[in-house]
């Protein structure tokens, strides 16, 4: 542990950039105090996104059924999560000894949202802008929530200022574009509009007092069994993934990283962390046997058998589906979403800070 005299703990836990004789030295410091997580000041988390982080918003908002075997691994029942168990956001919350986030739309959950709220809803995208439940709509819901929670003294202004605002969206924007038979060039031409919506969301949350942002890029779209099963002309990379789909995802991620860097310079009192989810997930696919997975491109729950076990007419939880044995090692749960086993690896790599820019620990925000 390295300490610098005269600086508060909050200053030291981010890290320091010191310039000496033209040489820039980056000192990244640990965020935990004596190994304790959030010892006195639990953080509130407000999450915005799609099905990758939806903890029940789809059911609450649209009444859409998410049937078993979803949820079988950890919860023992369906909770609205599109996975056999916990999502990455669940595992990140548990790393801080926090309770899991309740969906903002679920009035029957009995939550007072003291630890934050989850605005993510499956199938969400950034565009069209005013279409439920787009990113802009989710931000509008947050603004309404903030006004209500403040009037009821559930969360103070200081709590909203110190809260962590997580954004994990963009996959559906790319996916929908390819579904419309747009060319690779046409898909990438839409990326600036998606990035602009994310920028608008961050600024809107900043204007509401938010200062801490944790932004995930999008994963390797071309490695999803759903995409692989639906595309007839396959331009496959060495690991069996669709090259053009992954190239589009990388283009999006490059633009998102540029946005985060630019906003970090513009919003100088904000902490903006960019996390390379693509690199984490692609590593799991490319080195699947190292992580104990034998069929990284095949869904555990679906229909059709090898090589992808995906049938759009017989989705997981719908009549005609088949599911792998509980405890089997699969990366993909239903052809689109990851299993808890894979999510656990993703979460552990996020917590390592090796994929974050800047390399700020996730538990830094509860110690500020």
Image: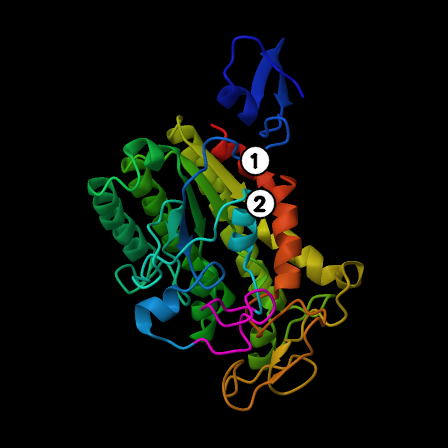
- Per the rendered image, the range of residues in magenta is 66-83
User: Which scheme is used to colour this image of the protein?
Assistant: rainbow
Give the number of callouts: 2
Asked whether, in this view, residue 137 is left or right of residue 103, the answer is left
**In-front residue for pair 291/105:** 105
Q: Residue at x 58, y 47 (%)?
A: 276
Image quarter of residue 324: bottom right
- Above or below 98: residue 301: below
Q: Residue at x 37, y 51 (%)?
A: 117
Q: Quadrant of the N terminus?
A: top right
Q: Disc 1 marks which residue?
A: 37
Q: Is residue 181 among what the camera can see?
A: no
Image quarter of residue 354: top right
Q: Is residue 1 among what the camera can see?
A: yes
Residue 72 located within the stretch drawn in magenta: yes
Image quarter of residue 76: bottom right
**In-front residue for pair 33/92:** 33
Q: Disc 2 marks which residue?
A: 95
């Amino acid at each position: 542990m390295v300490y610098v005299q005269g600086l508060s703990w909050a200053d030291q836990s981010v890290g320091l950039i010191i310039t000496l004789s033209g040489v820039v030295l980056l000192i990244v410091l640990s965020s935990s105090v004596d190994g304790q997580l959030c010892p006195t000041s639990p953080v509130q988390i407000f999450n915005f996104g799609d099905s990758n982080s939806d903890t029940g918003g789809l059911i609450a908002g649209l009444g859409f059924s998410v049937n078993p075997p979803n949820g079988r691994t950890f919860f023992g029942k369906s909770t609205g999560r599109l996975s056999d168990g916990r999502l990455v956001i669940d595992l990140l919350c548990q790393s801080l000894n926090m309770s899991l986030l309740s969906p903002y739309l679920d009035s029957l959950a009995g939550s007072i949202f003291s630890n934050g709220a989850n605005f993510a809803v499956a199938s969400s995208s950034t565009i069209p802008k005013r279409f439920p439940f787009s990113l802009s709509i989710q931000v509008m819901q947050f603004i309404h929530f903030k006004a209500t929670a403040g009037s009821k003294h559930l969360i103070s202004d200081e709590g909203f200022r110190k809260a962590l605002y997580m954004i994990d969206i963009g996959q559906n924007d790319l996916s929908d574009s390819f579904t419309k038979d747009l060319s690779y060039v046409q898909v990438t031409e839409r990326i600036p509009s998606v990035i602009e919506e994310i920028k608008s969301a961050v600024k809107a949350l900043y204007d509401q007092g938010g200062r801490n942002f944790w932004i995930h890029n999008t994963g390797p779209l071309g490695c999803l069994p759903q995409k692989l099963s639906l595309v007839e002309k396959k331009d496959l990379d060495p690991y069996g993934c669709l090259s053009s789909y992954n190239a589009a995802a990388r283009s999006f991620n490059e633009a998102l990283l540029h946005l985060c860097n630019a906003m970090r310079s513009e919003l100088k009192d904000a902490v903006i962390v960019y996390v390379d989810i693509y690199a984490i997930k692609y590593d799991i696919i490319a080195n699947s046997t190292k992580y104990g997975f034998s069929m990284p491109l095949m869904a555990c729950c679906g229909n059709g058998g090898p090589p992808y076990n995906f049938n759009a007419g017989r989705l997981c939880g719908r009549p005609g589906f088949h599911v792998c044995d509980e405890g089997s090692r699969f990366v993909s749960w239903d052809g689109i979403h990851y299993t808890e086993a894979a999510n656990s690896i993703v979460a552990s790599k996020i917590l390592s800070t090796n994929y974050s820019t800047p390399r700020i620990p996730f538990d830094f925000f509860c110690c500020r």
